[in-house]
Image: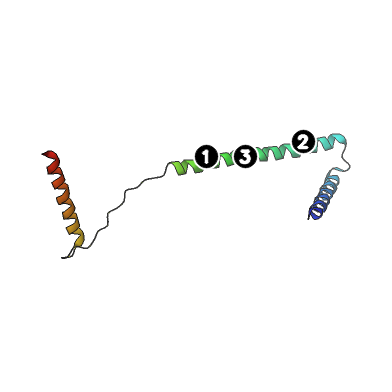
Amino acid sequence: MRKKIKEFLINAWDEIEYLLRLLCGKPTPMKRFMMVLIIGGALAVANIYFVVSSIYNMGVSDAKKQFLEVQHIETLKLQQSKKDSIKSIKNYELKIKSNEYEQSNR
């Protein structure tokens, strides 16, 4: 596997070198130096852009996690029937609370 990757990289480099020679002829040492600087500068700018945008996106996602919007829960509208067990439970709870309140005030 390593051998295949090494061959691929060598062939890719040969193709890049061939294309550069077609564009520039046989580059002088100064032309080579300038090409290396230009390509290196472009890659450095791209690297800085990706690092900064990744840090910014992490901050944005952390802020969304930290400040979740809280909404009120809407009450359900239940149908009222003659044998309403919920209504009797609420009445029972109110009686208990009122008894507790009366006992605490004594």
Mark 3: give few (<14), some (14-19) or many (20+) Cα within 10 Å.
few
- Residue 18, position as x, y percentages in the image: 85, 48
- Residue depicted at 14% across the width and 40% down the height: 104
Where's residue 3, x and y in %? 82, 54
Picture quarter with the N terminus: bottom right
- Residue that numbered label 1 is attached to: 59
Using the image as rendered, state which of residue 29 and residue 12 is in the foreground. 12
Disc nearest the viewer among 3 and 2: 3
Of all residues, the one furthest to the left in this rendering is 106
Q: Residue furthest top?
A: 30
Observer-nearest of 59 and 17: 59
First in sequence: mark 3 vs mark 1? 3
First in sequence: mark 3 vs mark 2:
2
Q: Quadrant of residue 57?
A: top right
Horizontal side of 94 relative to 66 (left or right) equals left
Q: Earlier in the sequence, mark 2 or mark 1?
A: 2
Identified at 12% across, 43% down, the residue is 102
How busy is the neighbourhood of tag 1: few (under 14 within 10 Å), some, or many (20 plus)?
few
Q: Residues within 10 Å of mark 2 (few under 14, many from 20)?
A: few
Name the amino acid type tagged 2. Leu
Q: Decide: is 88 above or below 14.
A: below
Work out how far the residue at label 2 is from the one at label 1, CA to CA, in angstroms: 33 Å
Residue receiving disc 2: 37
Q: Are marks 2 and 1 in contact (CB under 8 Å)?
A: no
In the structure shown, which secondary structural element does the residue marked by tag 1 occupy?
helix
